[in-house]
Amino acid sequence: MNLPPADPELVASTVAGLPDRLQKRLDTTVSGSPGWNYADGVVDLGGAKVTLAPEDGSLRRPENVICDCLLAPVCLHRAAVVSVAPVADPAQEGRVREGSRAEGGWSAASGDPEVSGASAAPDPETSWPATSETAVQGPAATVPGAPAAATGGHGPAAPVPANPSKVAEPGSVVAGFVAPESVTAGTGATAAAQPTPGASAPTVPDPTAATPAASTPHSNPAASKPIFSTPTRSAAETSVTTASVAWKPPERAAAQMIWDAAGRLLEAGTAGAGAALQGQLLAGVHQARLRALNRLAAATTRVVSAVRAARADDASFSLPGLTADLLEVLSVAHAVSTGTGDPSVWRGTARTVYSGVGGLRLAGLCLEPVISSAGYAGVVVWLTDAEGRMWSVSDVKPGDAERVMSSAAGPVAVGETGLSHRDLSRAGMIMSSATANPDGRLGSGSGVRAVRAAGVGWTEPQLLDRFGTLNADTGAANAGDHRPRLLALTVCGDDRNALLAVDDQGQGVRLVGPVGDQHRIHRDNLRLLAAKPGLRMLAIARPPTGDVNGFAAPARFLGLPGTLELIAVGGGDLRLPAGLGGRADLGFDRLSSRFLRPSGPPPPFPATGEVTDPLLAYRRRLERVVSGGRRTLSVPGVPREVRSEAAMLRRDQLATASVLLERLLDAAQPAERDVFGRLATETGGDLARAWLAAGTYQRELLAAPF
């Protein structure tokens, strides 16, 4: 059942308008959604029928959802339907309408007029003509976990700075340990704390403290400053005062609204996050969008979508992904509601700006399917220019997995090439007056001119040299860089659902496919490749969509092979039919064993030995709170286990993690009550603050360079 997306305000107001007796029945009604029938704009719930009349592909007003029961419009059926519908995402809707107006007018993918960067088109006689001096310098590397503004769930997002919750006053001391200087990993990462002989205590994150200057991850602890040392009075007061003045009271109130709702989500867990709590989160999303808190709104929308997937037992649900998104929500909400965050960092952007990049000569690389849990589907064509920069053309609109194939066969909206997306992935394109956003996605305004050109094979010299090793610039495992990487690999075998491969330097990588029944062709191709040890191949892969820290951060932390999602293969020992143009898009082209002819014995996969993740128990505790709520830390017997895990963290020289875990445990214990049953102390979000501090520490530790 593929319902049109619903606006957060519509969902929140519809659920809030129900009487209490109906709100109590709402979750039960929603749980029966698999048995509903949806056809011709009508949802048949069995006892009533709800007619949907979307505007611009989304349900925006109460008039768009009409029920035929006697209690309508204040009825359970309307609330249940909008609670099941995907949450409307302005960034996705903008892409649907992108290019609907003339060049220089409104661009839905950016929210701003497109800049006409007119320059002469490249010379079609040359294979790789130089681009205009006004061309953007390729998409910037960004960190996932931030709002996917105009990315459609398959591209990078905005950088995520550290903002741990307040768990101690600046400069406070906790027994036996002083933490070393932090490591800034593009976001203000804090390195793992290590003991210092003669030191008395570790310091603990403070949400208002500025991130210290970067140092090396292995600097001498005895000579280091504390991670969260108190800044000078003038610098601290100046920073906080400036940020507090910049945030307006309505903005802080909207952030506080989301903070409170996210805190209730932590209290109850996904198991207790019913439609009413989801409605509170969506009400906060609406207020955040009104106040232009784009980063907060986008992250909260992802949390609601993930909660729904968890409660529906959707195979695409990822608990680590939900944990990362909830951490993002609490981080941004805390920075805004307390007035301590820099608006230029924490506000985010609604849509990226498309600027002129002049003339381009592009060659298609591969075609990637996109199926979003928010109810959008389509394809992305990845292209490259003569300088190795990555560009993309996308067609992602509301729909389910069935739309992917039609989108692949559909025409490219950029210029007058006459190519389908599938054809463009193997052909070339010459553009003049091209526009693109910082992520490298090409605009389709009316002023853009594009014609078809000859493609470039992967094995031709222009491209072959770009297929490098895992540590090369073209395939660097930089945290947050979710662009495809061009690799030359040799198959070693398989490990459960992953293909094991090594590059020319012997570095290993696990190659996986996307999750979900709709990706059956992809999984079948992956199994076939894994069954051919010794197969040499050129591959295009990217960090998995759910990899919140880039290139499997826990694996980097432990020195283990990382994980990438394989998109396409070609060259090497593959003998593909001529019609495939020398490469196979694993989400579309079905491979055969006769195409795969290994030319030598398989190389050894790097031996990892017995590697124990010291943060495994720590990470699981954070995820269990998200899944099961406060009670996962307060039931009898659990506190003793948690304190034992905290002691193990101290033995592993992770004393700060130990302190944060113990404080999370203390915050999760039932509040004391007086003899009359009233709360003796006001908890006031202690669990949310303690969880935020613990989660921020883990995120920054895993994102730090090693």
Image (cartoon, grey):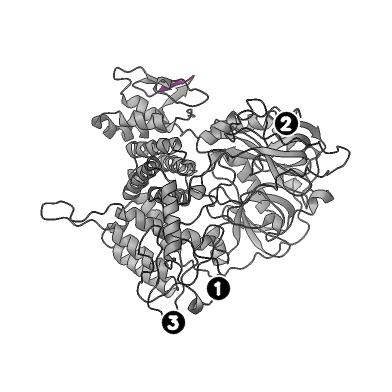
Task: Give the residue at x 40% y 69%.
Answer: 203
Residue type pointed to by label 3: Pro
Question: Dominant secondary structure of the magenta stretch?
Answer: loop
Residue at 46%, 34% in the rendered image: 87
Magenta stretch?
40-47
| Residue 293 locus on image (x, y percent) | 46, 41
The answer to which of marks 3 and 1 sits earlier in the sequence is 3
Residue 459 seen: no
Q: Which residue occupies the extreme left position in the image?
A: 675
Q: Does 257 sit above or below residue 15?
A: below
Dot 2 falls on a residue whose secondary structure is loop
Residue at the disc numbered 3: 197
Question: The disc labelled 1 sits on which kind of residue?
Answer: His
Q: Quadrant of residue 45?
A: top left
**Pick the front one: 458 or 336:** 336
Q: Which residue is mark 2?
A: 448
Left or right of residue 227, residue 419 in this image: right
Q: Which residue is mark 1?
A: 218
Mark toward the start of the polypeptide (2 vs 1): 1
Rounded to the nearest whole Å, what is the CA distance between mark 2 and mark 3? 64 Å
Q: Where residue 703 sits in the image (x, y, percent)?
A: 54, 60
Q: Position of residue 478 (x, y in %)?
A: 61, 57
Q: Report x, y in % for residue 317.
A: 47, 45
